[in-house]
Image (cartoon, grey):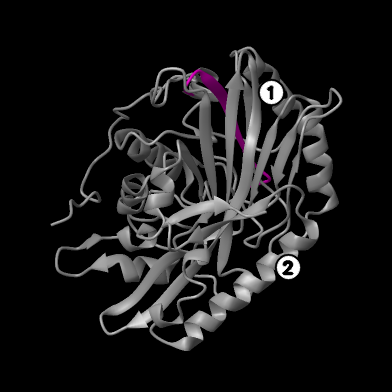
Amino acid sequence: MRKSFQNFVFVSALFLFSPGFLFGQSSEAGTKEVSFIFLGDIMGHDTQIRAAFNKEDSTYNYEEYFEYLKPVFEETDFVVANFEVTLAGEPIKGYPQFSSPDELAYDCKNAGIDFFACANNHCCDRGAKGIDRTINVLDMMDIPHTGTFKSAEERDQKYPVVLEKNGIRIALLNYTYGTNGLPVPKGKIVNLIDKDQIEKDLEKAKTKGVDKIIVFLHWGKEYQSEPNADQEELADFIFANGGDIIIGSHPHVIQKMMWTKGTDGKKEHLIAYSLGNFVSNQRKRYTDGGTMAKFTLAKTGNEVSIIEAGYYLNWVYKSYEKDGTHYRVLPVSQFENKPGFFISKDYFDKMDVFIKDSRALYKKQNINMNEYLYNPSAKKWSLSD
């Protein structure tokens, strides 16, 4: 029987981490590489909540979301996701003011998701309680996170977060354009997009002895497949002030990715404007899937650079079966030639539309960012040419 988390009373967080903490150990002496995967929006709509509910023991189970992606996550050092819900407790509810069961976070962690970015337009959905309880639950589960804080003092102590492995130190910053018009509760801190504050935070990150700075932004306009002028201007500002990699979320559809390699004394930069949805109940064209951005950093002497970068397309397979509704996130390259896997051809055809739309956009707009494809005979993934 799965453990129920809804009965816990979270008085205080049991797990605290400093703004510069060691996450993981060197896997092998002399190894100087670290890999990242960034996921799009993890949502919790009402239909998802109902599908996860087990009437027999009144618990929730989200394990099937990750069944086909767990092997990909296990091969990656850091998997980071936009956690676009709160864990505010009862009433458990979806849109428009989300509070998901604690089991969602628990199953994310068990699947291999290492870190949550929490600054997004839904982080204030349940007020001060929602912010505090979300932080407490994540801390109790030993799930590192950033973007929202119980107090200014907590932000000062814990921000920016520094991830370290194999002698490579990476600062991770996180901001949102807003909170759906809901005020940030008095005393609580939500990282809002503000250039002056971002510039200060970038300067603080540089004092931590980091090799790269990643900025995870909740920005842009919903359902638009191209970044707008504000996104491009802010990206230029962040790169000019020391950011190295920018990852975007919020539009619920994918937008272009660009890896500008360092040449002639110029710094390398990587940007994924929007990763779309990792998992949600949105089913309209372009919104029923997303992309996972992956990159690997290597350190030679004191120099750290991106040695590989690309993406996995993922599609949400929502199926209606005899025992109820199911949600499974599929890495599409592994299933695009398996129509027999689906309970009806309609599902396969919908995934095919998403694949063609996504590849057409990326073929036209991406720079140096290709797709990871699955080789069934070798049972492994490799970056396409």
Any part of residue 307 in sight = yes
Q: With 232 as the anchor, is 295 left or right in this view? A: left
Which span of residues is magenta-colored? 165-178
Three-letter code, disc 1: Leu
Q: With 58 as the anchor, is 129 left or right in this view? A: right
Instruction: Quarter of the image for the C terminus: give it.
Output: bottom right
* Rendering coords of residue 63 (x, y %): 31, 58
In terms of secondary structure, where does tag 2 sit?
helix
Mark 1 neighbour density, 10 Å: few (under 14) some (14–19) many (20 or more)? many
Instruction: Quarter of the image for the N terminus: give it.
Output: bottom left
Sequence-first tag of 1 and 2 = 1
Dividing the picture into quadrants, the one containing residue 371 is bottom right
Asked if residue 357 lies in the magenta stretch, the reply is no
* Rendering coords of residue 117 (x, y %): 52, 41
* Rendering coords of residue 298 (x, y %): 58, 27
Q: Which residue is mark 1?
A: 202
Between residue 252 and residue 347, name the one nearer to us. 347
Three-letter code, disc 2: Ala
In terms of secondary structure, where does tag 1 sit?
helix
* Rendering coords of residue 279 (x, y %): 48, 61
Between residue 60 and residue 312, name the one nearer to us. 312
Mark 2 neighbour density, 10 Å: few (under 14) some (14–19) many (20 or more)? few
Mark 1 touches mark 2? (CB < 8 Å): no
Question: Residue at point 54% right, 51% down?
Answer: 382
Give above or below for 215 relative to 301. Answer: below
Q: With 350 as the anchor, is 261 left or right in this view? A: right
Mark nearest the camera among 1 and 2 is: 2
Question: Residue at point 60% right, 52% down?
Answer: 311
